[in-house]
């Protein structure tokens, strides 16, 4: 039976970048594959120049993400409500550094989107022949090499990433997520077993000299809490 590592992404703000247009930097409505791989890579201590390591990590894991309407809080039995509101920030940077190392004497202006008061539960599955096993990833999440953030450096964690110390054995990622409250919500999965409603998203990192991304197919599934 497959095993799944469960992450809880919960913080004041999150930002999962999608197609950027120079001064406009939008956020996706749920964590992207590139963002989640970056999060794991930071915890594992993989350098951006370590192309082989990054590719090995990408080939090792599969993600299923649930959009949560509530999140646990210490000492409170009831889940705290999460709204997941998208906010836009007018951002300015003075004395920004150019690619050649010199200083830009003109201020850089941009509009940056963030997800405010959002929470996600992520089931990480292991692919065949994985060089990065779930146990190794779990240990790095407990003792991260680089500081993990929720998409951007300005988005710190509100709680530890691991929802539970051990993996969950389940028939599929949907069943694994159903054991973590709230047991309902919209699910975005890379697995084809959960839905016949596919959509396409361009968030698969192509590691190399230039930052490029490829498309992947994801499947939408809405899990309703049983009464």
Image (cartoon, grey):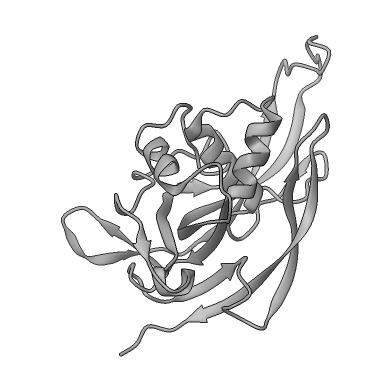
Outermost residue, top side: 102
Q: Is residue 23 left or right of residue 139?
A: right
Residue appearing at x 65%, y 47% in the figure? 34
Q: Position of residue 48 (x, y in %)?
A: 66, 28
Q: Give 111 or 215, whichever is nearer the viewer.
A: 215
Residue 157 in view, yes or no: no
Foreground residue among 226 and 177: 177
- Total number of numbered labels? 0
Give whichever of 18, 216 is nearer the camera: 216
Q: Where is residue 83 in the image (x, y as percent from the top left)?
A: 46, 64
Q: In the image, 152: left or right of 180?
A: right
Residue 160 x/y as whole percent: 34, 44
Query: Is 150 displayed left or right of 20 in the figure?
Result: left
- Extreme residue toward the left, this view: 75
Residue 208 in view here: yes
Q: Identify the image quadrant of residue 198.
A: bottom right
- Where the N terminus falls, by quadrant? bottom left
Residue found 83% across the figure and 45% down from its top: 21
- Tell me if residue 136 comes above or below residue 227 in the rendering: above
Q: In this view, does 125 lie above or below 48?
A: below
Q: Residue furthest front?
A: 129
Residue at screen point 81% across, 19% down: 106
């Amino acid at each position: 039976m497959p095993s799944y590592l469960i992450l809880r992404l919960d913080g004041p703000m999150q930002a999962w970048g999608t197609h950027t247009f120079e001064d406009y930097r939008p956020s996706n409505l749920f964590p992207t594959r590139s963002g989640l791989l970056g999060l794991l890579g930071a915890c594992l201590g993989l350098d951006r120049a370590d192309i082989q390591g990054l590719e090995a990590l990408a080939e090792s894991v599969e993600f299923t993400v649930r959009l949560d309407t509530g999140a646990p809080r210490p000492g409170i039995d009831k889940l705290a409500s999460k709204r997941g509101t998208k906010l836009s920030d007018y951002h300015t940077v003075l004395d920004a550094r150019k690619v050649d190392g010199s200083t830009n004497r003109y201020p850089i202006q941009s509009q940056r989107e963030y997800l405010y008061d959002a929470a996600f539960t992520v089931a990480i599955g292991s692919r065949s022949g994985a060089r990065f096993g779930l146990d190794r990833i779990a240990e790095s999440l407990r003792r991260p090499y680089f500081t993990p953030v929720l998409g951007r450096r300005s988005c710190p964690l509100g709680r530890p990433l691991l929802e539970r110390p051990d993996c969950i054995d389940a028939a599929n990622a949907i069943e694994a997520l159903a054991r973590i409250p709230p047991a309902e919500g919209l699910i975005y999965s890379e697995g084809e077993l959960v839905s016949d409603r596919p959509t396409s998203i361009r968030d698969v990192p192509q590691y190399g000299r230039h930052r490029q991304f490829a498309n992947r197919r994801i499947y939408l599934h809405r899990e309703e809490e049983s009464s």
